[in-house]
Image (cartoon, helix red, strand yellow):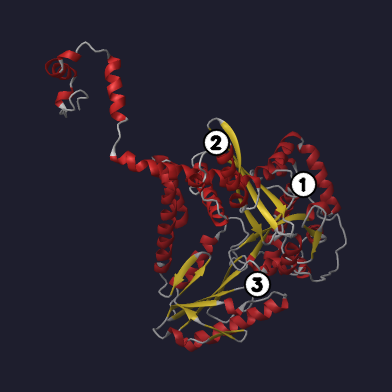
């Protein structure tokens, strides 16, 4: 538009040559004017009164009052004063200053600054939410460090505080990320949960006589091979020494460490300090007040675990030369995995010529924390393993403790030492007994650690009932004799092969009827009644879709999709599928 004649010009007329032509033809008297003259005309035009500006002036004053309300609320929040101070003190003070010092009417200004108790509280909640959202969104786009701390309120409630440090605009900032009430981390509650999870039986057994017979000292080659198996990046034990430090020590002082470990081997004693474990409770997303809703994670000293790693091959060699473990045990054994256990179950089902086939999974309660030590030690002795190795296992189980705080410990009297390299092997020897039971013909037992699967095959449904119930009865007798608790209500069964009247099969376990299901989950794989994996595939697809939806919602906050991010998404989905 021409500022001289207010004529609206088209796009083509905005070319410099045509604008000059318009100026010469229509405004010849203005051709000699300087640039500043036209800039003044532009400023006057932009500042001219318009309908929108006339209505916006009142709105602007209200916006200023709203902004003042938020700013004063922020000051109240930072000072920690009661929310009523805005209405009772600040607004009267503002009104007095306006009237006395500035000599301006105060009522019109004060009424545009809402500072009631409810308003201040609402403003604080809104600003807190906005700040939290901004901080979380920004942290998703940059590197940051996090620090956890614990604080106690006057009423003894424990708080978990999380602080983050990050760089923004070339400056380092530290902000409180969140504060959450700690429900389970008080010392008394933690001790109560640990007392429930770990057996407190007064177990005793006759200790063996120390003997030098058959002792094979460790060699430098064994030390070096064991050092290669040390996994770096793992959490240290109570002493705080990481596995990386042990690896360096083994490289620098291998002969010195070899001499110390051979002395321990000859003494057939496991140092007591290596048997103290720090414990952390992990919540399993169940009712938090139940002790069974927590999983204890124990961390031992890396030096003690290295000593166990050297002892273990000798015991394994002794077992192979005497009476080896059952081939049906797939847990805690080198070269075996859950995949092989599932394949063993699937092969037994697919190759059967019987008309009926059932899979029953037996649940053992808190097995690894309640197994009796005297029974664990008894089985290697029965197999006549070398005495010095049994003495080391004896010493390995004695005087074990859990570290609750820096000064308070709990004695452990049963169970497999968590985090231990050696502990699962003697337990496997004990549990081998259930796999060696004399079962009726048509019964096959497969175990992965304590997960026991029974495969029952028969030509008739009533025959299937008889042999399955007999097998379950023998298993329950063995468990009772070895002081292990069963959970019949958690025992599940599925008919993998049979007629349509599958519900007619009557299975009993410790007086509890086992209801056959359409499918059950064994070692993370869903097995259904058709010996297929259709239900497993459907569940995996649902998980993949849900996980993809969750991750896709993050993309807009981290700069949108890109090739590297798509690669990460694919790897996540790949891990879910497998």
The answer to whether residue 321 is visible is no
Inter-mark Cα distance, 1 to 3? 32 Å
Asked whether the beta carbons under mark 2 and mark 3 sit within 8 Å of each other, the answer is: no
Residue 134 x %, y %? 50, 44
Q: Which residue is mark 2?
A: 102
Residue 389 located left or right of residue 527: right
The answer to whether residue 142 is visible is yes
Inter-mark Cα distance, 2 to 3? 79 Å
Q: For the residues carrying marks 2 and 1, which lies nearer the camera in this image?
A: 2
Residue 85 located left or right of residue 223: left
- Disc 2 or 3, which lies upstream in sequence? 2
Total numbered badges shown on the rendered structure:
3
Q: Which residue is mark 3?
A: 365
The answer to which quarter of the image holds residue 400 is: bottom right
Quadrant where the N terminus lies? Answer: top left
- Pointer 1: residues within 10 angstroms few (<14), some, or many (20+)? some
Secondary structure found at label 2: loop
- Pointer 2: residues within 10 angstroms few (<14), some, or many (20+)? few
Q: Nearer the viewer, residue 94 or 567?
A: 94
Q: Which residue is mark 1?
A: 239
Secondary structure found at label 3: loop
């Amino acid at each position: 538009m021409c500022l001289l004649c207010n004529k609206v010009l088209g796009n083509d007329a905005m070319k410099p040559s045509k604008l000059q032509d318009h100026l010469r033809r229509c405004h010849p008297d203005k051709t000699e004017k300087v640039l500043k003259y036209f800039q003044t005309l532009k400023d006057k035009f932009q500042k001219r009164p318009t309908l929108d500006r006339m209505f916006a002036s009142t709105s602007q004053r209200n916006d200023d009052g709203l902004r003042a309300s938020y700013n004063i609320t922020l000051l109240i929040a930072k000072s920690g004063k009661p929310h009523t101070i805005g209405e009772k003190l600040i607004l009267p003070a503002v009104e007095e200053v306006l009237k006395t010092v500035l000599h301006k009417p105060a009522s019109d200004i004060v009424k545009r600054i809402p500072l009631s108790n409810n308003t201040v509280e609402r403003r604080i909640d809104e600003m807190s939410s906005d700040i939290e959202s901004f901080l979380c969104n920004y942290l998703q786009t940059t590197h940051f460090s996090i620090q956890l701390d614990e604080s106690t309120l006057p009423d003894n409630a424990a708080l978990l505080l999380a602080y983050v440090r990050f760089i923004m605009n070339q400056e380092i900032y530290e902000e409180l990320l969140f504060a959450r009430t700690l429900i389970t981390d008080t010392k008394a509650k933690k001790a109560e949960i640990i007392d429930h999870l770990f057996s407190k039986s007064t177990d005793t057994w006759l200790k063996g006589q120390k003997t030098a017979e058959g002792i094979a000292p460790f060699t430098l080659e064994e030390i070096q091979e064991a050092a290669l198996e040390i996994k770096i990046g793992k959490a240290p034990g109570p002493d705080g020494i990481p596995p990386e430090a042990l690896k360096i020590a083994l490289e620098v002082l291998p002969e010195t460490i070899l001499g110390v470990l051979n002395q321990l081997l000859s003494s057939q004693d496991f140092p007591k300090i290596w048997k103290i474990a720090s414990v952390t409770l992990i919540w399993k997303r169940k009712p938090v007040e139940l002790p069974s809703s927590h999983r204890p994670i124990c961390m031992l000293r890396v030096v003690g675990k290295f000593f166990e790693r050297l002892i273990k091959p000798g015991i394994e060699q002794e077992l192979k030369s005497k009476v080896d473990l059952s081939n049906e045990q797939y847990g805690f054994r080198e070269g075996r995995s859950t995949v092989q256990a599932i394949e063993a179950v699937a092969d037994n089902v697919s190759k059967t010529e019987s008309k009926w086939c059932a899979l029953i999974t037996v649940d053992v309660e808190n097995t690894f924390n309640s197994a009796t030590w005297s029974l664990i030690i008894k089985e290697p002795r029965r197999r006549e393993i070398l005495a010095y190795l049994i003495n080391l296992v004896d010493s390995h189980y004695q005087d074990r403790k859990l570290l609750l705080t820096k000064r308070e410990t709990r004695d452990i009297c049963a169970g497999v030492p968590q985090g231990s390299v050696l502990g699962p092997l003697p337990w496997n020897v004990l549990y081998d007994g259930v796999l060696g039971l004399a079962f009726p013909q048509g019964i096959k037992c497969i175990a992965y650690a304590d997960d026991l699967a029974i495969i029952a095959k028969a030509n008739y449904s009533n025959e299937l009932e008889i042999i399955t119930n007999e097998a379950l009865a023998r298993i329950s007798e063995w468990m009772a004799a070895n002081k292990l608790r069963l959970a019949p209500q958690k025992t599940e069964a599925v008919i993998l092969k049979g007629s349509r009247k599958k519900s007619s099969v009557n299975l009993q376990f410790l007086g509890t009827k086992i209801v056959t299901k359409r499918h059950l989950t064994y070692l993370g794989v869903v097995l259904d009644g058709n010996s297929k994996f259709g239900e497993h595939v459907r569940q995996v697809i649902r998980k993949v879709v849900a996980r993809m939806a969750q991750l896709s919602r993050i993309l807009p906050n981290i700069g949108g999709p890109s090739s590297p991010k798509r690669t990460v998404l694919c790897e996540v989905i790949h891990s879910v599928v497998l």
